[in-house]
Amino acid sequence: MPDRSKGEMFGIVTAMLGGGHVKVKCEDGKERLGRIPGKLRKRIWIREGDVVIIVPWPFQDDRCDIIWRYTNPQVEWLERKGYLTF
């Protein structure tokens, strides 16, 4: 679950841009350019339509880092419990 005190929020990957970058539609309504850090890039495949946790950059509001990707069973659980509203 996103830690709201650290500014984390849900997002959905809308487009793959290459070079470890993606377009993310965030739950606050903004579309940001997301960066996949190296430790995730080597271990987790991220595709269009995936639900992720992002952290917006403090100095550039239109960019963010991806810190977690949810699997399909996890997304279904989040939807059933009402955590995903977008």
Image: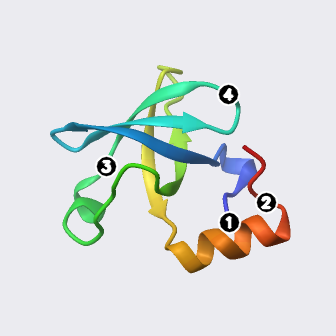
Left or right of residue 86, residue 20 in this image: left
The residue tagged with tag 3: helix, strand or loop?
Answer: loop
- The picture quadrant where one finds residue 7 is top right
The residue tagged with tag 1: helix, strand or loop?
Answer: loop
Residue neighbourhood size for the residue with mark 4, other residues' Cα within 10 Å, grouped as few (<14), some (14–19), many (≥20): few
**Residue 31 % position (x, y):** 52, 26
- The residue that mark 3 highlights is 36
Depth check: 7 or 66 in front? 66
On residue 29, the disc is 4
Residue neighbourhood size for the residue with mark 2, other residues' Cα within 10 Å, grouped as few (<14), some (14–19), many (≥20): few
- The residue that mark 1 highlights is 1
**Residue 19 % position (x, y):** 15, 40
Tell me if label 1 and label 2 are in contact, CB under 8 Å: yes
Depth check: 29 or 80 in front? 80
Residue neighbourhood size for the residue with mark 1, other residues' Cα within 10 Å, grouped as few (<14), some (14–19), many (≥20): few
The residues tagged by marks 1 and 2 sit, at their Cα atoms, a distance apart of 9 Å
The residues tagged by marks 2 and 3 sit, at their Cα atoms, a distance apart of 23 Å
The residues tagged by marks 3 and 4 sit, at their Cα atoms, a distance apart of 20 Å
On residue 83, the disc is 2
Residue reaching furthest to the left: 19
The residues tagged by marks 4 and 1 sit, at their Cα atoms, a distance apart of 19 Å
Which residue is pictured at 68% across the width and 66% down the height?
1
Left or right of residue 48, residue 85 in this image: right
Looking at the picture, which amino acid does disc 3 mark? Answer: Ile
The residue tagged with tag 4: helix, strand or loop?
Answer: loop
Looking at the picture, which amino acid does disc 2 mark? Answer: Tyr
Image quarter (top left, top right, bottom left or bottom right) of the C terminus: top right
Say if 12 sits above or below 38 in the image.
above
